[in-house]
Each structure stands twice: as structure tokens, then as C-alpha cells.
Amino acid sequence: MQGLGGGISVLDSSLAYTAPSSGFSLTIALATWHQIIDPSGTLATGTITMPLALHNGHMVVIISSQTITALTISTQGGQGSAAAPTTIIAGGRIEAIYRLSNNTWYFGV
């Protein structure tokens, strides 16, 4: 698909959306690339469980429209995590990539 200025546009057919009204627990599906969290206001707490990655380089992007003050990010199947954030600001973005050789999710904001 051709983008503006002759660039390439990428469509994410696996986009997932949730609009929690209070503290939430969310497990990201294996096929999800972008996960949007869209509460109506600041949330005191929230828990996100990463998908059980099967391949090196699996990527997930989490975007929140509002602040989540106390965020817990967990993994499945004994997978580890490095530098998982504990909060996200309004308009914030968390990127994660999985490294198979050491069974670990790496996070960046």
C-alpha cells in the first residue's frame, strides 16, 4: 500500500481495543501487535499479561489514552521481563520485543 509522499503504509489487522472503566486485567492475544487502552479517565491500577511468545522478535505496542498510575505487566509460561514499566502516562506508549534465546520480553517507553 502506498502512503503519503510515496512511503509505505502498514496496516495492523490485529489491532486490539479495550475501554476499561476501573482497574482492569487484560491478556494480550498472541496475534495482537498494537493494543489500545482507552479509559474515560485516569486509572489507579491495571494489569497487562503479555502473550506467550513463540518466536524471536515478537513485538507488541501498548498505547494508552489516559494515565494508569500503578501498572503491572506480567508474562506467561516462565518468560522473563526486562525493565517492564510500572506506570503509563496519558498518550503514552510501551513497546516490547521478545528474545527467544533467553526467553525474555524487553520493554521500552
Image: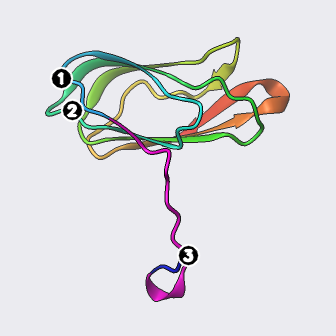
Q: What element carries label 1?
A: loop
Q: In the rendered structure, find residue 39 and report the number of the disc placed on it.
A: 2
Is the Cβ of the residue at disc 2 closer than 8 Å to that at disc 1?
A: yes
Disc on the earlier residue, 2 or 1: 1
Front residue of 102/15: it is 15
* Residue beneath disc 3: 8
Identify which amino acid the numbered label 1 is placed on.
Ser
**Disc 3, SS:** loop
Give the residues drawn in magenta, as a range.
4-17
Q: Is residue 45 above or below residue 31?
A: above
- Residue 42 sits in which quadrant? top left
Q: How far apart are marks 2 and 1 (CA)?
A: 6 Å
Residue at image coords 51%, 71%? 9
Q: The residue under label 2 is which amino acid type?
A: Pro
- The coloring applied to the image is rainbow
Examine the residues drawn in magenta and state their main secondary structure: loop
Quadrant assignment for the N terminus? bottom right
How far apart marks 3 and 1 lie (CA) works out to 36 Å
Seen in the picture, residue 42 relative to 108 is either above or below; the reply is: above
**Label annotation for residue 10:** none
